[in-house]
Amino acid sequence: MKIPALMAVAAASLLTLSACGSSSSTTATPAGGGGASSAPATGSGLHVADTSLGKVLVDANGRTVYMFSPDSSGKSTCDSSCLQYWPPVAPGKAASTVTGKVASTSTTAGGKIATVAGWPLYTFIQDQQPGDVAGEGFNDFGGVWYAVSPSGQPVKGAGASSSSSAPTRGGY
């Protein structure tokens, strides 16, 4: 009788351990890499870099920074599912080449997000390397995404698509 009891304890332990291990799958990373949480994607350090769109803001890791057309001054409208693909930029320091006023606001998920000239700032998970601008002109989550100029204005590059023909999340 001791062996069946030991087997039951071992099976329960195995189930408990496998349940603990599977909890990470509930925060699976969306296709294309990047974080699935609404936690800021970067540390402090906004600065300006040259890309195929010209001079744009980038985060501390050199990733292009974007603004979302439905947002307004000091108000992020990107919800938690949106933030999985467009992670918020962490508030922090900015280089002197960033000429727009740098501040922060809250995301709809309750976290903090950096702003420039009032616009909340995001990165894009499909930008794999510094200088990538895959999010430019992207029509996603009810609006269009634009790279951000050093003054905090949208950069509407030659490669930007119109909202009617821009790629959508279905292209992931």
Image (cartoon, rainbow, N blue to C red):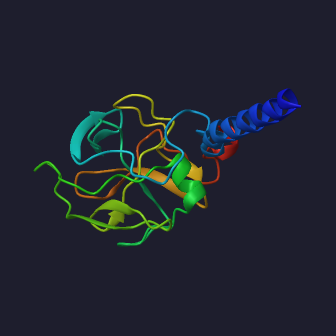
Q: Where is residue 17 in the image (x, y as percent from the top left)?
A: 66, 36
Q: In this view, does 100 lie to the left or right of 77?
A: left
Is 33 located above or below residue 123 in the figure? above
Q: Look at 41% across and 49% down and name the residue there.
A: 156
Is 114 located above or below residue 86 in the figure? below
Q: How many labels does the image show?
A: 0
Q: Look at 48% across and 62% down and name the residue there.
A: 69
Q: Position of residue 132 (x, y in %)?
A: 40, 32
- Between residues 54 and 122, which one lies in front from this camera angle? 122
Q: Residue 32's image quarter?
A: top right
Is 104 located above or below residue 58 in the figure? below
Q: Look at 49% across and 42% down and name the residue there.
A: 35
View extreme (front): residue: 1
Q: Is residue 3 left or right of residue 48?
A: right
Q: Position of residue 3 (x, y in %)?
A: 84, 27
Q: Is residue 29 left or right of residue 103?
A: right
Q: Residue 22's image quarter?
A: top right
Q: Where is residue 83 in the image (x, y as percent from the top left)?
A: 52, 54
- Between residues 137 and 97, which one lies in front from this camera angle? 97
Q: Quadrant of the C terminus?
A: top right
- Between residues 23 and 37, which one lies in front from this camera angle? 23
Is 113 located above or below residue 124 in the figure? below
Q: Look at 23% across and 57% down and name the residue there.
A: 151
Q: Is residue 18 left or right of residue 150?
A: right
